[in-house]
Image (spheres, grey):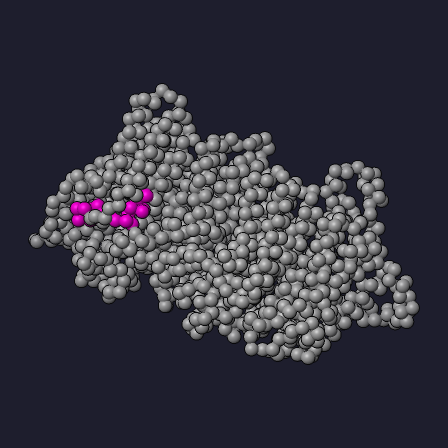
Amino acid sequence: MKVEALTWLVLFLPLLAAGIITLFTLRNKAVSATLSIGAIVTGFVLTLAVIKFGGWDARELSVNWLSIGSLNVDFGLKLDALSLMMLLIVTGVGSAIHIYSYGYMRDDPGFSRFFACMSLFTFSMLGIVLANNFLQMFIFWELVGVSSYLLIGFWFEKPSAADAAKKAFITNRLGDLGFILGILIIFTALGSLNFTVLESGNSIAALGGMATLGGLLVFCGAIGKSAQFPLHVWLPDAMEGPTPVSALIHAATMVAAGVYMLCRVFFIFTPDALTVISWIGGITALLAALIAVQQNDIKRILAYSTLSQLGYMVMGVGLTAPEAGMFHLTTHAFFKALLFLGAGSVIIALHHEQDIWKMGGLRKKMPVTFWTFMVGTLALAGVWPLSGFFSKDAILAAAHENNLLLFILGVAVAALTTFYMFRLVFVAFLGDRRTGVAPVSDSKEAAQAGDESMRQARRLSYEPHESPGVVIWPLRILAVASVVGGVIGIEALFGGMFKPDAAHPHGLLAQLVYPFQHAPVAALSGLAAFAVGLFAAWKLYANAKTDPLPDKLGALSRAMANRFYFDEIYEATVIRIHDAIAAIADWIDRWIIEGFCIGLVRGGTDLTGRALRLVQTGNLQTYAFLFVLGVAVVLWFVLGK
Amino acid sequence: MNVGLEHYLVVSALLFALGLLGVITRRNLLVLYMSLELMLNSANLALVSFSRFNDNLNGQVMVFFIITVAAAEVAVGLALIVALYRKRQTAHVEDLTSMKL
Amino acid sequence: MNVSYLELLKLAAPETIVVLTALAALVVDLTSTRDLEARFRFIINGMIACAGCVAAIVWMLVMPAHANALEGMFVVDPLTQVVKIALLGLTLFTVLISMDSTFTEHIGEYLALILLAAVGMMFLVSAEDILMIFISLELTSLSLYILAAFNKRDVNSAEAALKYFLFGGMAAAFTLFGLSLLYGLSGATNLGQIAAALEDKGLDPLLIVAMVMIVLGFGFKVAAVPFHLWAPDAYQGAPTPSAAFIASGSKVASFFIFAKVMMIGFTGGETNGVHEIAGSAAWQQFVSGWTPVVAVVAVLSMLLGNLVAIVQSSVKRLIAYSAIAHAGYMLIGVMAHSGEAVASLVYYAVTYGLTTIGAFGVVAVVEARSKDDQLASFAGLSRRAPVVSLCMMIFMLSLAGIPPLAGFFGKFYVFAAALKTGAPNLGLLWLVILAIAMSAVSFYYYLQVLKQIYVADMPAGAEELRVPVLGQVVLGLIAVGVILLGCAPNLLVGVLQASIKAAGL
């Protein structure tokens, strides 16, 4: 038996776990968690084994699934650098998140159900990654939709969670509509759905005039799943799910599926289609970054940040640099999962408080969480030599090469990214505890503590503390990955796959300096953007309060005697414009996209339904009359031609 | 005057239309049934005349079967009316509107 | 023409078996089980009916036949065998889900009528002669009318049946008139001969009138807009198992014969006993005659069915409107008129029928306890009857076309076959786009049902629903079938493909 056959195990173990949990062990928490965690960790180990003994070369395993006339579809696994790396991310980051969930969800009554859903989700996600044809990918694509629906709506007693789940599902279906149509067009025109066959068959030429349309329709699927403009509205709401779900779905895996799919079928996109893709990505990145600046909920900031980074990746793909997009996807999976889990750690420590203005001073109380969160922030902001720097630079370099306008946009987004992330860090972790206490009113305990004096006592005695080991160990692991992710050869791996002719850096040192040699403008702009963003955030948020920071930097702050003056300039210009733009962006988001488009669709169908219902009067002779009318119309239609 | 196929067909079409008109306009369920029968019989007339002019017997054979089927249909229909009448004491179509939306 | 009656009986053995079973159920119920409790009577006679269906299925599996008796009056080939087996399977499930019901004391008659309706469908599937088609259509319809009226305690049941009957009678008259015109134009009653005779006649207006009338007759049977108006009332008023049978078995048979008439009767040309589907100039001409009719009907069905379903508050009506929409999707398969399209159509119809029976089965369970089928009665069902709720979720998601359930693959297959036929100019593309868009809309109301089941709060004072073990097992089996046919469609599609090839379509 060849070592590749192990991949089948990787794929089906989570399904098995989900099945067993649903059928047998719903009452036994420990067994459920062990099964679920065991399945994914085993998957990770097996993936490592496949790579170790089988290498990164492209190969395929398949069994015939459907062979009916011209429709011949395999159920297959496509293994190459792209899917194997993605497999590592999903199982690796997934493992960390599963373990973390064990601590996070400990007291939840739906503990076993949660792990069953997580395993189902993992199975579907792995299916997308391994699919070797469009139909199989679409099936798992929808399964991911279903399982994310279950996870986002996990706390379905909360109406907001139920609504968010439904919104996520329906918005995704909207994108999938285009996707399946694109698949049908490709299938009709080319007669095959297999990626390898399509890729070798020069599909753009074979599609002819339909090529751009087909590609864009397929891209619709990615718009939905990767939450790109204008279907991005579901992602921030989806934060209603438990935090590990946010980390799993919205950082590492599900939203990455869209980008992954774009890279997988990169060969079907025409230059026109790619231009559209890159602009959609760019717009998403900018819009989301602007909105993130205005958010106060810690998970929402991260959600918009995810959106913005996904926009980056899509832009990278659109700029004919899928390797850069995938590179960023990989590093992003590390540091965004880290950030989400860090946020989760904060949230449980504060008894489900998510407003950053009610936090503050957490650095001392939760040192591990703080430092790992800091690493994630720096990586996201793109600080050399953390992973985010290299992947972001790859995209900026591609933009610099192909489209100057998008390059400027990208740099601006990079500055914004640093700005909102450090705002979060300054407000939530540094400084004093803002209100002195985390209000207990939001937490579940408060409902039980009806007595005001009890609540008072609780508030006084309340102290945030560091999370248990099962929560912080995943943080540590992910932090390490976030630091070194940029220099362990991922770029060369993807580069070797998509652009085998170009030179790619090998060796630690070469990788460390590669951005500066290869595209110095992009690299330096990225660093400059970081500096600008950091400076602005520091100016506005670190010094605005009388927290310990000014005391420590007393001399420095006095030396900046005219800081008041600076603040006013900021106030008058940057902040105002910023606020206005962010408000407009938010307004567009809320009213035009969500209110108008989705509202119109919903209201329209409702209205038509009511109008058509008038026909169904219950009176038989009305029916008979309509029947005859129908006959007459059909006859007229056919004979009249 | 020479009576040709088209004459039969016109009569048959008229009968069909009359039956249809009856189904749409009459109120009493029994009359509705008769109108339905009229429609079936107009088809029978067409079949017989086609059979004559096509010079084969297939059409006439069909007519015999259709007459039988029509009889069965009436039996079922009358049973339904009786069932309804027991519950509602009515045989009028306007009263059949308890389900709508 | 020499026909050995023994041979004929052997060919029609499955039908004969089912007829005998119907009589047996009738006799047994009237004589030996008369005095037992209704529940036991249902179980005993239901088992007899099931045994009959199984015997007929086994007969067809063991004795494959391929013959054309009495010049197309009764055609047996692998394809019709497969469809008949599927029909008997649906009948079997209908009998099983009705075993728990209490709406009638006339159990023998009820089961006999279900079986007779099944016989009608089986003959319909085998018919290639307009006389046979008409008679078996009527046999099916008459049995179904009575089945719809079977709940004598409910006023709505009689009303539903009457509407169904009057509407059906009208549609039958239209079909008959159309068939008589067809006979008049061609001088034959056999579909193949009709096609051959029409080939050199061209497309005269009378033929178009005939086509339209026949299409709308079938349009009535499959509940396509604008001939659908009976369906919501009939589904709502009829006893739930009857409605399930009307929605599933009758639909499968009607769609099959619809496609057959359209393909053999109007496509012109039967050379050397092999039906030529495409290619000839005459074919193009005839296609241009009936395709637009079907296209208009399909579009209207998809639009109206899905949009009106959104505002329904009765689950049975909701399923009725969704059935109208599904008829629209299936009509796309009829239009594609290729061997592959027939396979996809049968696959779709069979899986749809299975799913619908399951959904009605769940409705029956809820209805039996809460006395109505309003959406509100489903509130919190997941906590009152988890297994049944899970089954309902699978049925609803399958109807909505979510992979990997059977509903998804059916849609994919039909649409792919339709696009394939239209290739390279993608003639049916717009229809397919509309169908996909509307199936996304449909998702909204299916989710509405699931939301009631899983999210809404239980009504105060509701307790756990005690669902009989048999009912749970049957629903579970159907759900497994839906998943299995979705994950491994080859099980059915492979058989269909092989039999279509063998049948020479």
Name of the residue lying farthest toward the top: C35
> What residue sits 42% from the left and 64% below the top?
A192
| Residue at x-position 46% and y-position 59% | A62
Return the residue found at the far left.
Answer: B1
Q: Residue at x 37, y 68 (%)?
A: C425
Q: Which residues are magenta?
A: C69-85
Q: Quadrant of residue C25?
A: top left
Q: Nearer the viewer, residue A625 or C183?
A: C183
**Residue C191, image x, y percentages:** 21, 52
Residue C493 percent location from the top left of the image: 37, 52
> Is C78 a magenta residue?
yes
Q: Quadrant of residue A74?
A: bottom left
Position of A106 with respect to A58 (left or right) is right
Res. C441 visible in picture: yes
- Quarter of the picture holding the C terminus of chain C: bottom left
- In front of the other: A164 or A477: A477
